[in-house]
Amino acid sequence: MALNYVSMALLSVLVYDAVFLLLLLGIVLLLAGTKRAAFAVMKRNFIGYFSNPTGYVFLCIFVFLTSVAAFWPYEFFNANLATLDQLNYWFPMIMLVFIPAITMSIWAEEKRQGTDELLLTLPASDFDIVIGKYMAAASIFTASLLFSQLSTFTTLAILTEGSLDIGLIFTTYLGYWFVGLAMIAIGMIASFLTGNLTVGFILGALFNAPLAFASLAEAVSPSKQFAEWVQGSGIARPFDDFGRGVISSSSVFYFVLVAAVALYVCMILIGRRHWTGGKDGNQMAWHYVARALALVVFTVGAVMLFRTHELGRRDMTEGKVSSLADATKNLIRNLDDDRPIVIDAFISNEVPELYAQTRYELINLLKEFRAEAAKRNRTIEVNMYDGIDLFSDDAALAAERFGIEPVTRTFREKGAYTQKQLILGAAFRSGLEKVTVPIFEYGIPVEYELVRSINTVASGNRKRLGVVKSDANLMGGVVMSGMQMQRIEKHPLIDELAKQYEVEEVDLTAPISPDMYDALLAVQPSSLDPQQFDRLVTAIQAGVPTAIFEDPRPVGASYITPTGDPKQAGGGFMGMGGGGPQPKGDIRSLWSVLELNVPGSAAAQGMYAPDLAWQQHNPYPALEAANELWLFIDEALASEPGESLSDENPITAGLSQVLAIFAGGVEAKEGGKLKHTPLLSTGPVSGTLDANSVRQILSGSATLAQEIQGINPRMPIAMAIEGEAAADAEGEEADESAAANKGIKVVYVSDTDVILPEFLIIRADPKQMELRLQLQNVTFALNAIDWLTGDTSFIDVRNHELNFASLKMIDAREEQANSQVRKRSREFQKEFDETIRVAQEKIDTELQSLREEVEKLQEDREDGEVPQSVLQEKLTAFQIKQENQQRMLAVRRERMERERDQKIRDVRREADQDVTAIQNQVKTLAVALPCFPPLIVGIMVFASRRLRERENISKSRLK
């Protein structure tokens, strides 16, 4: 199957190439029809180059160098992306060798052989000769580039199993082609200046060097502004768009104008025979110098104009990795002209594999932000400090001015876990507002972080989010847990929301007016006292948008009172508790207002215990702790799109997987007035269990199979509720809510564990424990708040996921190796447990006889038959032997633990070595194999040429 995908990818790129070559063929045919002399010159030089074995040697060197630059650097496999970033970096240097090799003989060889005068006597203009020579060199370079592209593309297609981004690779090579066109024109100037091939090669490299090395100007220039200007004049910046899969008008115009200016200089040099030596020769020379300088100035001005006023940009990548979301473009379009945005991004030179894609995405998006702002006449200044050392001046600037410091992360390399430091942060400024992102975690969408930060500094006003104070204590506090006081830290979700909203805690000691908050967040509202609960219900009826997370059995936070349990009183002596259960609000009144039907049964003290949902589905078999009460709401279970995670509401549209733990079911009442949209629904093999059955299962008294009475597929566990509803409350508060009723807008989730702090850790580090978790719980929660506040633009940005082509062949080998590591680790652990169990049983057997003797002596001692000293002596002997046995067991356990851990480390090291061996094999084949086709063709051309030379020579002269 993978071979078919590779073949289809190769066929697709050949179609791209065929269309491109047809366009070039049209240009050549146009030249042949209108400029016959130019076509004759082009044909002569092109055939002459490939009739000589030397041309194939240079072609072989070119393919070899591009393959080495693309695949040999460590960063290629470390990034695990099917891009040509490494080749992009080295390509200008490769061109400094290859382009002069093509252009050095353009005119110098004609002078050396004395055929230049013959060419000049042809019935052709100087333009015909120059353009013919130029198109011959361009054709030679195009043919060489096609060799390189096919070899590079084939390697990437195999590594990605055919799923590489064809648009990105083709556009990158199109950029190489434009770079070559510009450098060929400049190299021709060198050839027109000399008749020596070596001098022509050296001058060609020297003339092109400023454009190739302009990107390094900052390292040698004391003036940052001048260095930026020089960098912008080199080929690196205009090529950068092509390297990211973007065709932009400014980049195309840059290369075309540079080539045009260089060709005009070539026209001047070939035409100088007409005016040198005459009485006006010096004046004509200065005249043409002025013309050339005027063209250079025009080119610089035109390039700057096109960069600030793009005529068009098109992202050619299949994954749209260089495109901004529509919401992002709208944000940039609506920025205030009087509040320019300054972004300072700091990126260390070494970034681990897990953060390589994030680094690529950050750099890519920052450049698109800058381009989009220029297109919309908005000011976004991007200062990118890329490739900085951890102890450099730039790193010191990041720490002192913006608080962006190196962050330590743990990674596994070569079978062992190591810690590395990296810098990957950014600071955003506008006026007096400043926001800092100290680290872009690789699991969090970069575009979302950028847009949220820009929006924060661009507008001083934030929407208000009220967090209801309940047993959940999202804002932090002190609670009773068992018989001890427990300090609860602020929930990390609050910190996440505070980046976008003005977050305040609400204790509900007073009524909430509809305009006080843009939305409320209520976690386990059933734990509120009756008065607070009624005020919450009244606020909901009054139209305050509210997110409700109500859990029948919280797992992650044991201090949260379940829906059907009485709330225990705090206080007492030293805070150790006292008194009876505290009164709670009647959750059923909220369900009535929301027109919800929650399956369950009556509980003690007049309460109601909701049933718990179960489901048979675990997409992560290695997650052994999961059971049927862990609900993986997965689109993979849906028979049609949107069945598990609704696509009718922007909260879940585009999401694919959310995990709920010990959640309840929730259904809409029949005949209600409100609109209910199920957001999260269980799979086809699922149902509900009552609270007693769940207790039996958790205690081990029963199994899930024994307690299941039937299935109830597609049970919703989260609802979006909208519409007008009649107020059930009475009194003054009800009258006020009826007067100002804006309609109910609620998101009800029958689980609090869906927003556990662990999910924020998983979001930032989804590959922890090597499980590659794809859970989108945090995105679901943030989308819910945004939907309630009406700020859905961030939902669009958050759901805008960039699709990068990874090296699936390497990924599969790594997954295979990791699976083997997990399997062997379980075997080692099982062997360890079994050995310890046997050793413990042996000790118990050895002590059993002595224990029986002690028990017999104790009975005899009670009857007065044995003196106390004898019993004490036997007890002491028993204790000594028991301690000795336990000490020996502890020593043996410690030794076996070391052996077990060493075996696991050895297995991991072997797995990593296996992956490294595959990588090295790919490197070798990717570099060596592409050289054979041009070498074989070159040998055949050489042999054919030698045979033709010997055809009319007598045998006696060949001896």
Image (tube, rainbow, N blue to C red):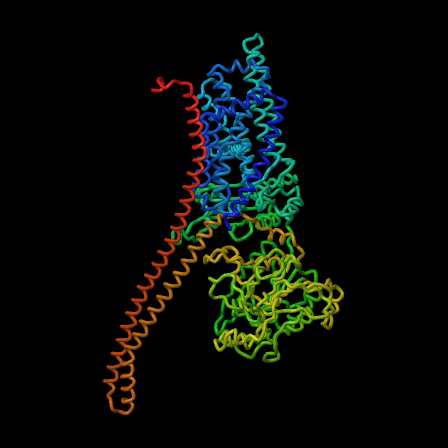
In the rendered image of this protein, does residue 616 appear above or below residue 811?
below
In the rendered image of this protein, does residue 670 appear above or below residue 657?
below
Q: Nearer the viewer, residue 63 or 743?
A: 63
- In the rendering, at what x and y percent does residue 394 appear? 48, 41
- In the rendering, at what x and y percent does residue 16 appear? 58, 39
Determine if residue 408 is in view.
yes
Q: Residue furthest top?
A: 279
Q: Nearer the viewer, residue 432 or 845?
A: 845
**Which of the 4 quarters of the picture holds residue 660?**
bottom right
Q: Nearer the viewer, residue 594 or 46?
A: 46
How many tags in the picture?
Answer: 0
Q: Nearer the viewer, residue 703 or 596?
A: 703
- In the rendering, at what x and y percent does residue 137 appear? 52, 26
Determine if residue 400 is in view.
no
In the rendered image of this protein, does residue 226 appear above or below residue 692?
above
Quadrant that contains the C terminus = top left
For the point 38% across and 50% down, the residue is: 913
**Which of the 4 quarters of the picture holds residue 491?**
bottom right
Q: Residue furthest front?
A: 955
For the point 65% across and 60% down, the residue is: 519
- In the rendering, at what x and y percent does residue 130 appear? 56, 21
